[in-house]
Image (cartoon, rainbow, N blue to C red):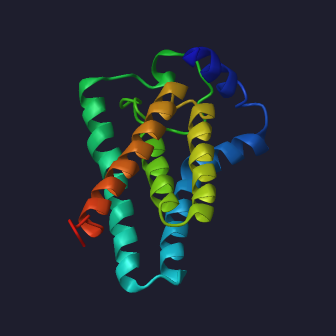
């Protein structure tokens, strides 16, 4: 199933310069726009400085846990070659032959979207759509299997949820009798 869906999505590449350009933009440059958008939302929001710092710290820890800690631990113990290494695929962007499972981009941007969800539900929709576009574009571009994206998204979402639960314990402790 993973390979069937991958080959279907990857077969969309190489047929249209416009579509390929959109895929490359989504896979390589949309991540920068989302990161910049997150910073702008924080700067321009009406939250007080302390809450802005908490949101930034919470989001950073969520992304760090998902991308740098969990994803890299999995990659260390379980190597999955990228689709273009052993298969004939339409590879639209260059990527080193490092492990592809789970997707670091999916883990990062789904963690960011989930972190935003806890503070601003409407903006989180934009970030979830962005995370999906980035992730699907990386499959179409031939550098990730669909299963890489799926587990990267799960890791990102669960990482943000875990950090949120920890933050709740730190910043909203339940006091006996108070």
Q: Nearer the viewer, residue 34 or 117?
A: 117
**Residue 70, percent from left and from top:** 29, 40
147 horizontally vs 100: left or right: right
Q: Nearer the viewer, residue 56 or 169?
A: 169
| Direction front: furthest residue | 177
**Residue 51, percent from left and from top:** 39, 77
85 horizontally vs 37: left or right: left
> Eyeballing the image, is 61 above or below 68?
below
80 horizontally vs 44: left or right: left
Q: Nearer the viewer, residue 149 or 10?
A: 149
Residue at horizontal 42 percent and vertical 85 percent from the top = 48
**Residue 120, percent from left and from top:** 54, 66
Determine which quarter of the picture holds residue 10.
top right
Q: How many marks?
A: 0
> Eyeballing the image, is 94 above or below 10?
below
Location of the N terminus (image quadrant): top right
Location of the C terminus (image quadrant): bottom left
Residue at horizontal 70 percent and vertical 46 percent from the top = 21
**Residue 63, percent from left and from top:** 37, 53
Residue at horizontal 36 percent and vertical 29 percent from the top = 99
Residue at horizontal 59 percent and vertical 55 percent from the top = 30
């Amino acid at each position: 199933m993973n390979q069937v869906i991958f080959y279907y999505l990857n077969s969309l590449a190489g047929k249209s310069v416009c579509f390929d350009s959109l895929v490359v933009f989504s896979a390589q440059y949309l991540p920068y726009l989302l990161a910049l958008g997150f910073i702008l939302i924080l700067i321009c929001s009406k939250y007080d400085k302390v809450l802005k710092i908490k949101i930034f710290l919470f989001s950073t820890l969520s992304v760090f846990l998902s991308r740098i800690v969990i994803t890299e631990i999995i990659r260390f113990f379980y190597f999955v070659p990228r689709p273009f290494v052993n298969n004939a695929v339409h590879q639209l962007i260059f990527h080193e032959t490092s492990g592809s499972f789970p997707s670091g981009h999916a883990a990062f941007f789904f963690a960011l979207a989930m972190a935003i969800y806890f503070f601003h539900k409407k903006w989180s929709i934009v970030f979830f759509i962005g995370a999906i576009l980035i992730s699907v574009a990386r499959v179409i571009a031939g550098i990730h299997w669909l299963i890489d994206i799926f587990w990267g998204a799960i890791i990102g979402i669960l990482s943000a949820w875990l950090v949120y639960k920890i933050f709740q314990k730190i910043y909203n402790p339940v006091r006996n009798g108070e």
